[in-house]
Amino acid sequence: YAPTFLAAAASFWIFPKEGFRSNVLHSALTLHYFKRVFESLFVHKYSASMLLDSAIPITVSYFMSTITMIYTQHLTKEFPEPSINLIYPGIMLFLIGIIGNSYHHFLLSKLRGKGEKEYKIPKGGLFGIVICPHYLFEIIEFYGMFFISQTLYSLCFAIGDTFYLLGRSYATRNWYLSKFEDFPKNVKALIPFVF
């Protein structure tokens, strides 16, 4: 996440004075990836390390998506503002998403004591109704970014992130069902009471 955080932070100097909408989008992206770096270093308790052949494509994907979102926003500076301004609902969605995501990552970090590697069924927050509320809130974050930027690329990114995390949450739920006999069957994968 560090290269993506640095790219988002550098966007303030690469594209200075592009207006409120761009500044808010750059701030949201910078904050999102700063949070990811911080959590990776100080919050998450990993059961194993990630293989380099998995880490590189993920890093490149986040980096390219972020700089594309920033550059797409830059390309809109000569166009008139959208007739319906969604920036303030976007800020609210982003804040709800980042706070909810952080909170559920914190709950996940409390599952393991020092040196423990075993998996446990998460509890608290929205874990009683969905197994991946942190993914749900991440999706809300990216729709907030779409509302902030109101570009086709940011919408496509939010939709792509939604489908990616739907798949991951479905696989995670199936894994929990296979691993724990006492896993509650009413807990959905991602969308409360639906999926």
Image (cartoon, grey):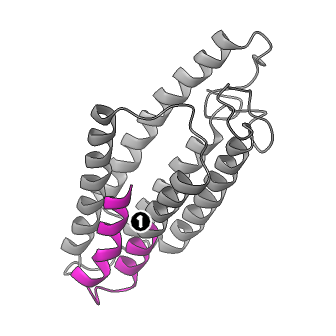
From the top left corner, tell me how far across and down residue 32 is, in percent.
48, 62
Q: Which stretch did the figure color magenta?
A: 1-28
**Which of these two is toward me, 179 or 64?**
179
Residue 88, quarter of picture: bottom right
Q: Which amino acid does label 1 sit on?
A: Leu
Please tell me whether mark 1 sits on a helix, a strand or a loop.
helix
| Residue at 19% in and 81% down | 78
**Residue 181, horizontal then vertical, whole percent:** 76, 9
Q: Quadrant of the N terminus?
A: bottom left
Furthest toward the front, the residue is 115
Compared to 21, does 108 lie above or below?
above
In which quadrant is the C terminus drawn?
top right
- Kindly report the secondary structure that dominates the magenta region of the rendered protein: helix
Q: Nearer the viewer, residue 139 or 174?
A: 174
In this image, 156 relative to 133: left or right?
A: left
Tell whether 142 sits left or right of 99.
left
Q: Mark 1 points at which residue?
A: 29
Is 61 a magenta residue? no
Which residue shows up at 45% across the image and 35% down it?
49
Residue 169 x %, y %: 55, 29
Which quarter of the picture shows residue 92? bottom right
Question: Is 90 located above or below residue 156 in the figure?
Answer: below
Which quadrant of the structure image shows residue 85? bottom left
Tell me where residue 107 appears, x and y as whole percent: 73, 46
The answer to whether 28 is drawn above or below residue 54 in the figure is below
Image point (46%, 55%), residue name = 142
Is 26 covered by the magenta stretch?
Answer: yes
